[in-house]
Image: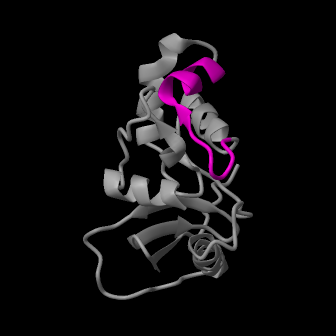
């Protein structure tokens, strides 16, 4: 059986929180992460990156609460389950890491689910920023706690 190769596109999207690096294929988002090292200007490669840029602009301007992008994150079965659960957290709401672990079947999964959150390859769209400490404290965010705070303020 022949190996099918998918064309991938790398883009840099400017948001109010800094540049984001997007990896897409012809119809899906594979990764979207903050890139504090990139400063050269916005580059949009492929139709999906244009859609990401448009939806992020609408999100940051308060016109969008749900994203319509096709997502194709790469991870373990457990990570994919965690990221899928993150998509069910409504805009404007938060849950604790403990609540997330319970939703995944057991409070004992708290460390594993927190670790999977930290490895979420699709920032903002898969809203790991909506998971907070049991005390309400902002804990852990790969993009930086200042970004997590700004995202929650939206």
How many marks overall?
0
Q: Which colour scheme is used?
A: one colour
Question: Is residue 85 left or right of 78 when viewed as pictured?
Answer: right
Q: In this view, does 80 lie above or below 125?
A: above
In the depicted view, which residue is nearer to us: 90 or 36?
90
In the depicted view, which residue is nearer to us: 44 or 91?
91
| Residue at the image point whose x is 40% and y is 70% from the top | 17
Query: Quadrant of the image for the C terminus?
Result: bottom right
| Residue at the image point whose x is 67% and y is 54% from the top | 2
**Residue range (magenta):** 89-104
Image coordinates of residue 28 in percent, x first then y, are: 66, 63
| Residue at the image point whose x is 36% and y is 38% from the top | 139
Magenta-colored stretch includes residue 103: yes
Q: Is residue 144 above or below residue 41?
A: above
In the depicted view, which residue is nearer to us: 24 or 34?
34
| Residue at the image point whose x is 59% and y is 40% from the top | 83
Q: Quadrant of residue 55?
A: bottom right
Magenta-colored stretch includes residue 38: no
Question: Is residue 8 left or right of 35 when viewed as pictured?
Answer: right
Image coordinates of residue 118 in percent, x first then y, are: 41, 40
Question: Is residue 97 left or right of 81 when viewed as pictured?
Answer: left
Q: Which residue lies furthest to the right in this view?
A: 68
Q: Is residue 144 visible?
A: no
Q: In which quarter of the image is residue 30?
A: bottom right
Q: Can residue 74 be seen in this view?
A: yes
In the depicted view, which residue is nearer to us: 120 or 127?
127
Image coordinates of residue 90 in percent, x first then y, are: 69, 46
Image coordinates of residue 72 in percent, x first then y, are: 63, 53
């Amino acid at each position: 059986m022949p190996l099918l190769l998918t064309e991938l596109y790398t883009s840099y999207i400017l948001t109010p929180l800094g540049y984001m690096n997007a990896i897409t294929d012809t119809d899906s988002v594979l990764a979207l992460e903050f890139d504090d090292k990139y400063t050269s200007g916005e580059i949009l490669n492929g139709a999906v990156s244009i859609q990401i840029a448009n939806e992020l602009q609408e999100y940051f301007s308060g016109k969008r609460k749900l994203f319509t992008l096709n997502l194709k994150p790469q991870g373990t079965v457990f990570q994919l389950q965690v990221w899928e659960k993150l998509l069910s957290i409504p805009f404007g709401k938060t849950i604790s890491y403990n609540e997330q672990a319970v939703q995944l079947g057991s409070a004992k999964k708290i460390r594993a689910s927190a670790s999977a959150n930290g490895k979420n390859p699709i920032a903002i769209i898969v809203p790991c920023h909506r998971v907070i400490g049991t005390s309400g404290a902002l804990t852990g965010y790969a993009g930086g706690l200042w970004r997590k705070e700004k995202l929650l303020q939206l």
